[in-house]
Amino acid sequence: MRTAASLSIVVFAAACASAPQTPFVFAAHETAPVKSSDDAADDPAIWVNAADPSASLILGTDKQAGLYVYDLTGAVMQFLPSGELNNVDLRQNVTIDGWQGDIAAASNRTNNSVTLFTIDDGAVAESGSFPSLLDEPYGLCMGAWGGDVFAFVAYKTGDLIAYRLAGPGGGEEAARLKLESQLEGCVFDDDAGVLYIGEENRGVWKTGFDGAQFAAPGLIDEVAGASGVKADVEGLALYKTGSQTGYLLASSQGNNSYAVYAREGDNEFITRFSVSAGDAIDGSEETDGIEAVSASLGDEFPAGLFIAQDGFNAPKGSPQNFKIVDWRGIEALIEAAQAESQTD
């Protein structure tokens, strides 16, 4: 097993000794595979256990069957057969119309709805749903802004609808946005009031949201541009180092890598990395959903972690799963890329 120190050394060597190669990290753990075969696992979310961070949980969708709940080693703690759930996200310690607690939302293609879940002391329970206003809800992320909680749902038509949640069992339309082609991944920055959206064949967009309307979106990175991002642009995630600082991450599915941008300012591109096969755990390829968290999650993950869906789990033909990466390895390669850029 690699220690944290040896992990950083491996990553730094990959970043500096072989410039043409995409820097890489290794997974610390992988989740048990989903039960469904073929293209099934899709999107993760992380629930932080404030009382015992090492007992935090990973929520992961099986888009043919429902929602898995894993511990930080990847063991299955629960499975909820809630339907064809594509994307999932959550918010903790929120108040919605008098209800207070931790809530998750998932796009459900079984009945064209958004399915809601409560998380109470580590137990996940389905709490309700509301109808999607367009067919086939696809991408989804959540956000908290102006005292309200929202589920942002992205569609293959290029539409995106913000739904304002009404307690743990309902929601209503708050705003709409239209882009030209298929959308999926998104992530909302609660501190800045900014939504990032992945348009699969175009790039990563950024738009302000004030709870009632979206600002005009701007493209922060383009497929086949200088950063090397390659279609499809899939999952998006934020890693926060402060109230306005940190990193935006995007799954570059076409070349099995993950792009890293500055969270602040104009979201300057920093680097790309991949999750490579290690001694006991394979890497990740053709990733759909990703997630990151900066909270300390115990001795094994003191700087948080990164999770990526794996489109081709090993051995060949195995059902898909999710790879769990110690953030310290990613931070090492970010620091290496930033140091190199300062010497250019």
Image (tube, rainbow, N blue to C red):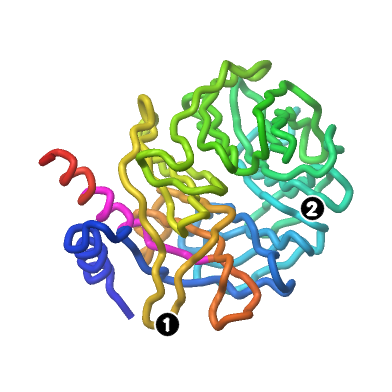
What residue would you read off at disc 2? 126
Position of the N terminus, as image quadrant, is bottom left
Q: Main secondary structure of the magenta part?
A: helix
What residue would you read off at disc 1? 280
Residue at image location 53% in from the left, 24% down from the top: 193
Direction from residue 97 to residue 276 in the image, left or right = left
* Image vertical order of residue 159 relative to residue 129, above or below: above
* Image vertical order of residue 253 relative to residue 206, above or below: below
Residue at the far front: name it.
224
Direction from residue 260 to residue 16 in the image, left or right = left
Instruction: Give the camera-side residue of 51 and 322.
Output: 322
Instruction: Give the camera-side residue of 231 and 163.
Output: 231
Position of the C terminus, as image quadrant, is top left
Q: CA distance from mark 1 to mark 2?
A: 35 Å
**Quarter-of-image position of residue 202:** top right
* Image vertical order of residue 54 relative to residue 226, above or below: below
User: Given the image, on which type of amino acid does mark 1 rest?
Assistant: Ala
Q: Foreground mark, 1 or 2?
A: 1
Residue at image location 82% in from the left, 58% down from the top: 83
Direction from residue 89 to residue 20 in the image, left or right = left
Residue at image location 34% in from the left, 33% down from the top: 268
Q: Position of residue 331 (x, y in %)?
A: 29, 52
Magenta extent: 323-335
Circle 2 SS class: strand
* Image vertical order of residue 174 relative to residue 312, above or below: above
Residue 117 seen by the camera: yes
